Amino acid sequence: MLVHEAMSNAVLQVGPGHTLRQAAELMSERKVGSAVVLDPDSEGLGIITERDVLNALGRGLDPDTEQAAEHITWDVVYAAPTWTLEEAAQAMVRGGFRHLVVMESGEVQGVISVRDILRCWVRVPA
């Protein structure tokens, strides 16, 4: 099975100026564990995950004032829609993360998570 068959096409996007609380609320509403961050004035495309929010809270940062920009991962590992699920899983294990942004021709196509891969491998519907 290929990444494009398992990924989520509905990608949550937040701006670098969103607070951590806003990012967390949006992820919670959408039932996703990550959001793509587009910042044309900075590094371009990044990702913020539930783990980033949790780590910030664990350090005692205020989710109402702390901005997403300070917690974005900019060195994102991208998956191609034509990768196999095994290739995506290997990239996640190597990098120690649970989400891959899926890119094709410089455009975001979706996000694939560990949960998406497991769902396919164990054949349990969403």
Image: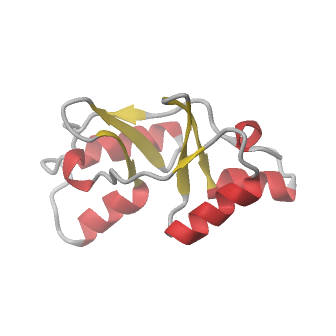
In the displayed structure, would residue 40 be above or below residue 76?
above
| In the image: residue 109, left or right of residue 84 | left
Look at the picture and state if 98 lies above or below 104.
Answer: below
Quadrant (top left, top right, bottom left, bottom right) of the C terminus? top right
Q: Quadrant of residue 62?
A: bottom left
Q: Residue furthest left?
A: 65
* Relative image position of residue 35 (x, y in whole percent): 42, 42
Residue 13 screen position, x and y as percent = 40, 33
Q: Residue at x 27, y 46 (%)?
A: 21
Specify whether 1 is left or right of 3: right
Q: Horizontal and vertical percent for residue 80?
A: 63, 42
Which residue is at 46% across, 47% downward?
A: 34
Residue lying farthest to the right in this orientation = 123
Query: Residue 103 or 117: which is nearer the viewer?
Result: 103
Q: Name the residue: 85% across, 59% down.
A: 122
Residue drawn at point x = 50 percent, y = 67 percent: 95
